[in-house]
Structure formats: structure tokens, C-alpha cells
Image (spheres, helix red, strand yellow):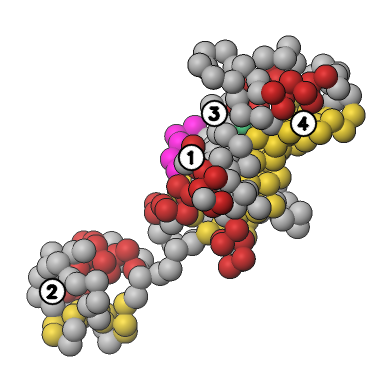
Amino acid sequence: MRLDKYISNASDYSRSEVKKLVKQALVEVDGIVATNPGAIIAPSAKVYLNGDHVTMPGPRYFMLNKPAGVVSATKNSEHPTAIDLINTPRTELLQIAGRLDIDATGLLLITDDGQWNHSITSPRSDCRKTYQVTVAEPLNSHLVEKFLEGIWLEGEKRRCLPAVLEIEDDHHAQLTISEGKYHQVKRMFSAQGNLVTELHRIQIGNICLDPALAPGDYRALTPLEITLNGAGGKEQNA
Ligand code: URA
């Protein structure tokens, strides 16, 4: 990696600020004062800025209780984004591991670890997601079987994978799916002539939304949660 990129990724300095710091002879690489901010440095290089060791921060993992009205995107000109709610440096490196619609709420995982993100969102991972669903029309118990058989969605060539529907009362159910098609839950109910009026995600893989998080709050994942990620899916069990 270039020296200026390394330091700006590891600190709050921009690349142009790093160039100035190099000019001021404040940067050392492996004990030698750096003169070229564009120099390529080895992964093992020891970089010092003003005498302080500059190290890359480790990967970051957060769970957010997404409120309605917030978009699952890194940038949006009209609405606040999930990333706007995370108060941490270098937010431009963060990615969302599995989106929620603007009106949907609940568990959103955010990380700068691309591989970890992939282990959750890759279609091959079959990572389970559980939603609390509120619907407009009364729920009929025959739906449980239909969801288990696999719902046909308009415009799709194959049925959805089996989904587990647990009906709580006429208008409330918990649904667990292991795919991530566009608007999947809303489309599954729509294919059965019903309308989802509220959608709240409570679990991804084995990571559960922390009930202590109010809408808009977030926290770092624990080391155990990080290792759990999408566990339960195909890639983890292979
Ligand atoms: N299914 C949907 O329809 N919307 C979501 O946000 C997530 C799953």
C-alpha cells in the first residue's frame, strides 16, 4: 500500500495532510525518514508519525437498531443513512451486511470487514434472518405449510427456499427466511394476497438484536457475536 494511504487509513489525517507531514520529515518507515508519500510500503513496515507508531485499526463490527425513515445505504441525498448514525472514525470504510427497506426496522449489521460481510450476504451462505411481521389481512394457518413448501414470487424462476412462519395472532407472525431477495418478505406475503404493514428484523444467523438498543442506538458486536455471524447457513456448516 502507498505510505500516504496507509497513514490516512490508520488515522484521521487526509492524504494531502499526510503529504505535508512527510515534507516536514515527521514520518519514518523502518527507522528511515520518509521523503516520498507515494512510496509503496511492505505489509511488515513499521511506520512512525511524530514518534508514534501508526497501526491499522482492526476491523469493526456493529449492530444497529435501525429506525424507520433511515436508509440502509452509505450515502443518500434525501434521507439519513444507517452509517450517519454510527459515531466512529473512517465511516467511509463501513458497509452494511444485509439491507432493510426504509420503512423496516430492527437489526442491521455494519462492518468494514468485507469477507465477514460476504459470509452473511452471499447467496451461498443461506444465512437465516428472522422478522417480526405485521400484516393487514388476517393470517390463515394454511400459510405455514405454503411458506414451508416455498412461495413463488412474481418474476422469479424458482420458488423461495422453505421459510418458517410462526403465527402469533391474526395480524402478527414471526418469519425466518434464508435468502435475501429484493423486498422478499413483503413480496412473499403479497404473493399470498396480504400486505406487510410493519417489518422488524430481530435476528441474522445467530446474532440477535440486543433488546437494550432503542431505535437508532447501536453497539459494537462482542467477540462471540463476531464469530457467530451467519452461523447456521451452508457456508458455515460446510
Ligand atoms: N424483506 C423485505 O421485504 N424488506 C426488508 O427490508 C427485508 C426483507
The residue under label 1 is which amino acid type? Arg
Give the image location of residue 29, x and y in percent. 18, 80
Q: What residue sits right under mark 3 in the picture?
A: 181
- Dot 2: what SS? helix
Q: What residue sits right under mark 1 in the picture?
A: 124
The residue under label 4 is which amino acid type? Leu
**Mark positioned earlier in the residue sequence (1 or 2):** 2
Q: Nearer the viewer, mark 3 or mark 1?
A: 1
The residues tagged by marks 4 and 3 sit, at their Cα atoms, a distance apart of 17 Å
> In the drawing, what numbered circle is on residue 23?
2
Residue sitting at x 18%, y 64%: 2
Q: Residue furthest left?
A: 35
**Mark positioned earlier in the residue sequence (4 or 2):** 2
The residue under label 3 is which amino acid type? Lys
Q: Which residues are magenta?
A: 74-78
Residues at discs 4 and 3 in contact (Cβ within 8 Å): no
Residues at discs 2 and 3 in contact (Cβ within 8 Å): no
Classify residue 38 as left or right of residue 84.
Answer: left
The one nearer the camera, 37 or 134, is: 134
The residues tagged by marks 4 and 2 sit, at their Cα atoms, a distance apart of 63 Å
Q: Nearer the viewer, mark 4 or mark 3?
A: 4
Q: Quadrant of the N terminus?
A: bottom left
* Quarter location, residue 224: bottom right
The residues tagged by marks 4 and 1 sit, at their Cα atoms, a distance apart of 22 Å
Q: What residue sits right under mark 4 in the picture?
A: 165
